[in-house]
Image (tube, rainbow, N blue to C red):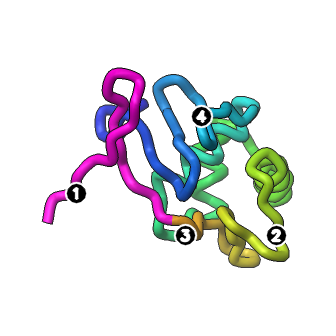
Amino acid sequence: MSATDPGCFRVGDLLVDPGRRRVERDGTELTLPGLTFDLMLALVRAAPNLASLDTLMRQVWPGRVVSPETVSQRIKLLRAALGDEPEAPRYVAGVRGHGYRLIVPVEPCKLAGGSVDVAVRPA
């Protein structure tokens, strides 16, 4: 987790905790392998904007040479873990040839005593 990240993110009905590298829905942890979690976090940090293929390749696979197909395959794994469908996306939308974005609201939050408080955004 970087110094600029809040304690967690509320992503629609998901809770994304960068510090513990966890994604939960209704208190149940969703299993995301390391690179899939990294991809999710890159999309969360870019939201609501589009994360370009180049940006995703740099952030998720730093120092490695990967292709847009690698990103596409990892997006498929992420969608499967979230129960998302490319034909009727609930979380991740693709923009062919450009990148991906989250289509659910993303709000910073903090973990306080085991519970989640949505952080208040400055006006």
For label 1, the residue is 121
Is there a contact, CB below 8 Å, between mark 3 and mark 2? Answer: no
User: What is the C-alpha distance between the residues marked 3 and 1?
Assistant: 21 Å
User: Which is more foreground, mark 4 or mark 1?
Assistant: 4
**Please, what secondary structure does the residue beneath circle 4 have?**
loop
Q: Earlier in the sequence, mark 3 or mark 1?
A: 3
User: What is the C-alpha distance between the residues marked 3 and 4?
Assistant: 28 Å
For label 3, the residue is 50
Of 3 and 98, which appears nearest the observer? 3
Of 13 and 43, which appears nearest the observer? 13
Point out residue 107 in the picture as x, y percentages from the top left corner: 39, 55
User: What is the C-alpha distance between the residues marked 4 and 1?
Assistant: 24 Å
Q: Residues within 10 Å of mark 4 (few under 14, many from 20)?
A: few
Query: Hey, which quadrant is residue 113 in on the image?
Result: top left
For label 4, the residue is 27
**Please, what secondary structure does the residue beneath circle 1 have?**
loop
Residue 111 highlighted magenta (yes or no): yes
Q: Amino acid at mark 2?
A: Pro
For label 2, the residue is 86
Point out residue 73 in the picture as x, y percentages from the top left corner: 85, 53
How many numbered dots are placed on residues in this image? 4
Q: Residue at x 62, y 53 (%)?
A: 56
Q: Residues within 10 Å of mark 1 (few under 14, many from 20)?
A: few
